[in-house]
Amino acid sequence: MDNIIIAEELTKEDIEYITDEPDENKKGLEIYSTLKYSDIVRALMQTQAPKKEAVLTSLRLSPEFSELTLSSPEMLTKFGIWPEVRGWRELQTMPRYFKGRPILVKACVNTLIESE
């Protein structure tokens, strides 16, 4: 009788926890974060590596890292790879080069011209 929960006793958080599907991408990154770099390289290079299955599972479940998904830091903050980037939207609306901003320009210069 201990396993039965009366609906009246459930809070909104309890219902969300019960009905929320596990995030496979997050699980893939959690597995990846427990592995050492040498384990990952060994698993990818050798056919019989000790942690090969964990590495392959991690890669299979990890989110897609592409130019499209990394165009903003939202995906990286969602999975805890980066901390929250405050002011991101505001930075995107500001001009990169405003009037009077000093910039460096790569240019070919002929140094053989004599000055008068």
Image: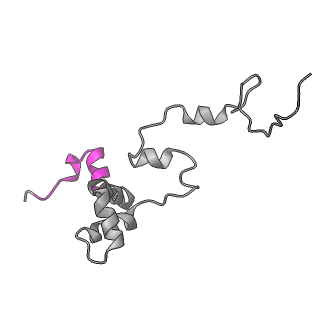
Picture residue at 54% right of the left edge, 58% below the top: 66
Image quarter of the C terminus: top right
Name the residue at the right extreme.
Answer: 116
Picture residue at 74% right of the left edge, 35% below the top: 105
68 horizontally vs 80: left or right: right
76 horizontally vs 92: left or right: left
Choose between 115 and 30: the one closer to the eye: 115
Question: Eyeballing the image, is 8 above or below 83?
Answer: below
- Looking at the magenta stretch, what is its main secondary structure? helix
Residue 82: image x %, image y %? 42, 42
Residue 60: image x %, image y %? 39, 68
Residue 94: within the magenta?
A: no
Image quarter of the N terminus: bottom left
Whether residue 57 can be seen here? no
Name the residue at the left extreme.
Answer: 1
Picture residue at 40% right of the left edge, 46% below the top: 81
Picture residue at 42% right of the left edge, 47% below the top: 78
Q: Specify how the rendered protein is coloured.
A: one colour
50 horizontally vs 100: left or right: left
Q: Quadrant of residue 52?
A: bottom left
Residue 65: image x %, image y %? 49, 57
Residue 77: image x %, image y %? 44, 44
Choose between 94 and 17: the one closer to the eye: 94
Q: Which residues are magenta?
A: 3-18
